[in-house]
Structure formats: C-alpha cells, structure tokens
C-alpha cells in the first residue's frame, strides 16, 4: 500500500495548541462541504458563496451564484445527495427564515420558527428548482442525508418544542427524489433547556435494512434509535454503548462495508477526569462539553462493536467538533470539523481542520 508523504503541522497551529495525528494529512484548499461526486468524477459543493465545482480534488473551485436563499456557513445545516437516478437534491434549514430566541426567565423558546426545505437539479447542477418546504418549525444542525437501498431519501433532524423547552428528533423522507416528503414520529428524551433533549442526529442503513440513528444527548453517551420500515417510524429507542460529549457524531458506511464514526468523546483520551458543567439554561443536568479531541472508530459488524477510538486531532483549550466525513474514493476519507476554535466557548481564533486519511492506515494506527 502506497502512503503519501505527510505534510507537517504548521508551527503557527502548534503554538495554538493544535495537534494532528501523524497518520492524517492536511487537505489544502478544500471547502467545508458537503460534497457530491458528479457523473464525470468532479466534486460539487454548495455553501454561502454558492455552488462550486472542482476538477482537482477541491484544490480550486469554480465560481457560481447562490442557488437559493438561506444557505450560510453554519456547518451541517444543509446536505447534498446525488440519487441513483442522477437527480441532485439539497436538504437544508432555511437560515434566512430561521428565528431562534430564548426567554431565560421561564426557560422557554420565544418567537422561534423557520423551515426545513429541499431544492433539486435534474441537469447536474446547472439549474435548480422544485423548492419545497419539507417541514415548518425551528430546526438545528443534522448530520447526514442518505438514500436507502430501496431508493428512499432519508434524513433525521432536530426540532425545537416547548413546555418544557427542549429538542426532539424526527425523520423526513421522500420516495420520488425530493418532489414530495413525509415525516416520521417524534423521538423525545425529555430535558429542559435550549441545548437539552434529543439533538443533532446522524443516520445510516444497516445490512439487514434497518435504519440506525445516533442522537446527541447530555447523558454522557449517544442514544440510538432503530427503524424497521426505512426510517418512517422509530419504535426502539435506547442508550448506546458509545460514550459521547454533548456534541454530535457522524456515521458513514464505507465502500469496504465498514462503518466509520467520528465524534467527541465524553472526556480526554488520557482518562483524566473532565469536569461536567452545570448550565441550567442549556440543560437541566450537568453535562460534559468536552470538544478538545475529535476521534474516529470503525465497526465491521454493523455498529455492534467498535475498534478502539483513535484521536484524529486535538485543540488544547478549544474545540474541534461538528464533524463531516466524505469518502472521496474507496478508502480515502476526508474529515472536516465545522467548529474549530482555539479558545473555550467559541473564543480565540478560528483554525480550519480539514484532514485526509487512508482507511487502512487509520485502522492500523488505532491498533498501535
């Protein structure tokens, strides 16, 4: 197996407390995604600058006007998918219409609203139309938009509810490449606070056809939900065995058949105790907000068991969180963190984290 030479970590990043595992390379010029591969192998992305197409693995991008209002630089707030029939579908939270405010005196949402929308292209991204309001409400980040083996488009999204104010999760799905949409039942873990409840889920299809959802929680681990009907109803909800901070994770089925999970663990790899924070407006219980390390693990048995977590990157005193994972070609993983700050609570400098690693190299590094 040929391994490309590693780029050294720039000294300026080292001074800021940034460490990257030597098995990982830094991607140069790449945007934050999301990405889809077009029929001719080029990459397409949409961000606040508009639609971009790259013929050189993201080193340079074409310029194009925005395809619709409401797309911002907020990470994991919109996703692209190229369906089996070649239609491009973008599912997104309309950030131009989104309203979020919190009444601290009563701990309830105030004047919140917006919409989850979709838009399509049937000509490889040249023109876009068929905009739909998928659901009305106040939505937050979601981590994944998939097409099942039977052709259903599926995503899980967090929705803000009140009395008590908290987040719940529901699914949205389409049987006709994004022309019409349905929704699933609500998954409610309880809680009270503007960052409490069932939050920021990620989804994938298991080999037996069931859909697995991993849900961010404040309970020291991901909660998991299973659907036996392609993501329409979720009748099994339970805690998972995966420890996690109050931060989301990203699941991806790889070409090899393995599953990759990238996330923030509940505490440091060193095992050093991490102090939970008591933030009553955020959550009704103290919880871990550890986001200084971003880890990856793999599963060969459909998420029943996992390899030992491998820390991809560390930002001492800051955060590397909200991961997006893209398999550029079989075995080549791109890992991008949406929130990468050098200081606590979104303080200090913003230092992008965009990494590339070979799947087998990461597996070997995790065993060493």
Image (spheres, rainbow, N blue to C red):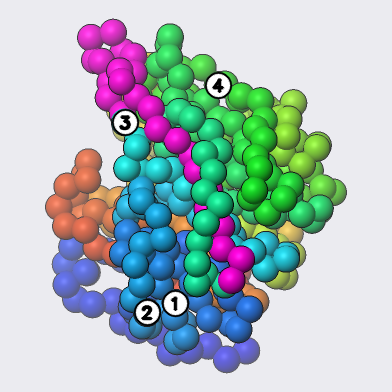
| Closer to the camera in the image, 77 or 298 | 77
The residue mark sitting in front, 3 or 4, is: 3
Q: Residues within 10 Å of mark 1 (few under 14, many from 20)?
A: many
The answer to whether mark 3 and mark 1 are in CB contact below 8 A is no
Q: Nearer the viewer, residue 197 or 151?
A: 151
Quadrant in which the C terminus appears? bottom right
* Residue closer to the observer: 11 or 253: 253
Give the residue displayed 16% in from the left and 72% down from the top: 12
Quarter of the image with the N terminus in it = bottom right
CA gap, disc 2 and disc 4: 42 Å
**Residue 355 location in percent, x, y?**
42, 71
The CA distance from mark 3 to mark 1 is: 31 Å
Dot placed on the residue nearer the N-terminal end, 3 or 1: 1
Instruction: Give the labeled residue for mark 4.
Output: 189
Tell me the SS state at disc 3.
loop
Foreground tag (4 vs 1): 1
- Reading the image, the residue beneath label 2 is 61
Is residue 207 found inside the magenta-colored segment of the image? no
Residue 155 appearing in the image: yes
Query: Mark number for residue 99?
Result: 3
Observer-nearest of 338 and 176: 176
The residue shown at (65%, 32%) is 183
Q: Position of residue 283 (x, y in %)?
A: 37, 21
């Amino acid at each position: 197996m040929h391994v490309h030479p590693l780029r050294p970590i720039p000294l300026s990043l080292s001074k800021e407390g940034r460490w990257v595992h030597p098995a990982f390379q830094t991607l140069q010029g790449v945007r934050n995604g999301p990405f889809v591969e077009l029929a001719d192998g080029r990459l397409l992305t949409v961000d606040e600058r508009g639609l971009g197409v790259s013929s050189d693995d993201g080193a340079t991008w074409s310029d194009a006007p925005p395809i619709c209002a409401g797309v911002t630089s907020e990470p994991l707030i919109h996703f692209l998918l190229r369906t089996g029939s070649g239609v491009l579908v973008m599912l997104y939270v309309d950030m131009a219409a989104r309203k979020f405010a919190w009444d601290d005196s009563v701990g309830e949402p105030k004047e919140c609203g917006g919409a989850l929308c979709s838009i399509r292209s049937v000509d490889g991204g040249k023109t876009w139309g068929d905009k739909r309001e998928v659901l009305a409400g106040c939505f937050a980040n979601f981590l994944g938009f998939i097409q099942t083996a039977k052709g259903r488009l599926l995503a899980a999204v967090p929705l803000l509810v009140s009395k008590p104010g908290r987040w719940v999760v529901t699914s949205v799905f389409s049987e006709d490449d994004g022309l019409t949409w349905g929704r699933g039942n609500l998954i409610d873990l309880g809680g009270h606070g503007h960052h409490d409840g069932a939050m920021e889920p990620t989804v994938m299809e298991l080999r037996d056809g069931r859909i697995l959802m991993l849900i961010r929680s404040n309970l020291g681990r991901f909660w998991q939900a299973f659907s036996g009907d392609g993501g329409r109803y979720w009748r099994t909800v339970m805690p998972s065995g995966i420890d996690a901070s109050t931060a989301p994770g990203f699941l991806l089925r790889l070409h090899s058949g393995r599953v990759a999970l990238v996330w923030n663990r509940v505490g440091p790899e060193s095992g050093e105790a991490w102090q939970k924070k008591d933030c009553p407006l955020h959550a009704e219980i103290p919880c871990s907000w550890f986001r200084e390390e971003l880890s990856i693990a793999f599963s060969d048995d459909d998420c029943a068991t996992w390899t030992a977590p491998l820390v991809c990157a560390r930002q001492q005193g800051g955060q590397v969180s909200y991961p997006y994972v893209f398999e550029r070609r079989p075995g080549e993983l791109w890992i991008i963190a949406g929130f990468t700050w050098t200081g606590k609570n979104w303080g200090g400098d913003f230092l992008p984290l965009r990494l590339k690693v070979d799947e087998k190299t990461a597996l070997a590094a995790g065993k060493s």
